[in-house]
Image: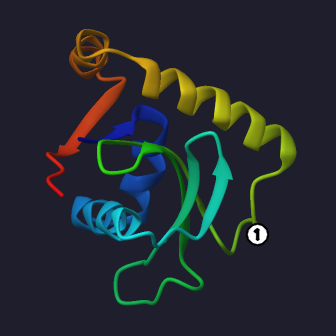
Amino acid sequence: MIYKTKVFQATFKKANISDDSLVSACNEMARGLTDTDFGDHLYKKRIAMPGQGKSGSYRTIIGAVIGERYFFLYMFAKSDKSNIDKREKLALKELAARYIGFNQKTINELLNDGELLAVEQYDE
């Protein structure tokens, strides 16, 4: 499954990027194409802005068990910052571990509360 956090969704919506882009990113990750593996199930993946390439577009930070669950946690424009700093990386690793550790009941509760949004069933 692919999920977006409420925080991620706010930036994502402003960027006018489709959920299909997230599905494509997860499919690429399943094929071993990540931009950065920060360790502890935390990854950076570039997402293109509509009508543009990936190089100057958006960076997404994803907590993932590749091929199973993907949690889009954070998104930023390359023009705004080049990368996350050490403190952000540590906090995002903790957040990724938390989401990855949730059972389906907890995920369903987060979906019902609007804290998580489901993107699409992921079938490898």
- Tell me the quadrant of the picture where the C terminus can be found: bottom left
User: Neighbour class for label 1 at 10 Å: few (<14), some, many (≥20)?
Assistant: few
Q: Identify the amino acid type marked 1.
A: Ser
Place of residue 117 in the rendered image (x, y in percent of width and height, measured from the top left): 27, 35
Q: Residue at x 59, y 83 (%)?
A: 56
Q: Residue at x 29, y 66 (%)?
A: 27
**Vertical side of 99 occupied by 113: above or below:** above
Place of residue 51 in the rendered image (x, y in percent of width and height, measured from the top left): 35, 89
Place of residue 19 in the rendered image (x, y in percent of width and height, measured from the top left): 25, 59
For the view shown, which residue lies furthest in the bottom direction?
A: 52
Q: Residue at x 57, y 54 (%)?
A: 43
**Vertical side of 72 occupied by 76: above or below:** below
Left or right of 34? Residue 84 is right
Q: How many marks?
A: 1
Residue 51, visible in the rendered structure: yes
The residue closer to the viewer here, 66 or 114, is 66
**Vertical side of 14 occupied by 72: above or below:** above
